Image: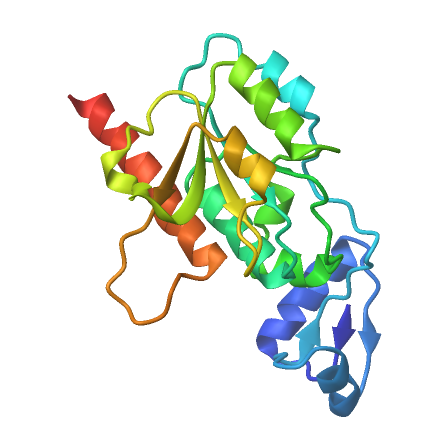
Amino acid sequence: MLVAKAGPRAMEIIDLAVESKVRVDRVGSFELDRLAPGNRGIALRIEDNFQDGVNLSLDDYLNGLEDRQDALALILDEITDPHNYGAILRSCDQFGVDIVISRNRRNAKHAGVISQTSAGAVSWVPQAEVPNLVRAVGQLKDAGFWIYGADMKGEPVYEKDLRGRAALVLGGEGSGISRLLKESCDGLIGIPSRGKIDSLNVSVAAGVLLYEVVRQRLRGAST
């Protein structure tokens, strides 16, 4: 932990760090601003070999489902911006996603950025890295999942029944879902827009789509 200005709130954090045996180093304000722009006088440095709090293999996840019918998975196809990745994890935590599946979840290996942007959700949302996303989709289908790809030309999301075992697929920034993965989906869903630009940021789209999944499931549970 790096500290430049020890105000009352910073002192409380420092005390907790000392209790937890976290190293605390005093640095100048200029140095801290260089290392952590936008800081408030205190910053935590995380090494890039930081391991996520919850790592799970896809096989273990599927084997543990048993009779559960409301399982929800999210598949990320080459999300390279760590800010987007972190923001998506935050939405996954809020909307109860069971597992996030990616081919290489650290295309941009910025653990500190991901942790900060996810507001800590990186430590709580189960994640699985697989060598082949198309093969992972096949495993999910064998387990009774319906696979829906996010696409601006897809069917309006609110018109698709997203209850039951479902997995959403989000494509990379700019490139979208890769061809073979898109062809593996059971359907494509989109978010109707009235704006003048062509699409939403992928992390924003993830939040909207996951909200609709939860909305449908809560509505179904109350009827």
The x and y percentages for residue 18 are 78, 60
Single out the residue that lies furthest toward the bottom.
30
Q: Position of residue 141 (x, y in %)?
A: 52, 18
Q: Coloured how?
A: rainbow
Residue placed at 28% from the left, 33% from the top?
160
Residue visible at 27% across and 37% down?
Answer: 215
- The answer to whether residue 147 is left or right of residue 155 is right
Q: Which quarter of the rendering shows the N terminus?
A: bottom right
Number of labelled discs?
0
Residue 220 in percent (x, y) is at 22, 24
Residue 144 in sight from this viewpoint: yes
Q: Is residue 136 left or right of residue 89?
A: right
The residue at the far top in this view is: 67
Please indicate, yes or no, whether residue 98 appears anywhere in the rendered image: no
Query: In front: 66, or 102?
Result: 102
Which quadrant holds the C terminus? Answer: top left
Viewer-proximal residue, 70 or 43?
70
Rendering quarter of residue 116: bottom right
* Residue for point 84% across, 63% down: 23
State left or right for residue 102 relative to residue 208: right
Corner quadrant of residue 104: top right
* Residue 70: percent from left, percent from top: 40, 21
View extreme (left): residue: 223
24 w.r.t. 40: above or below: above
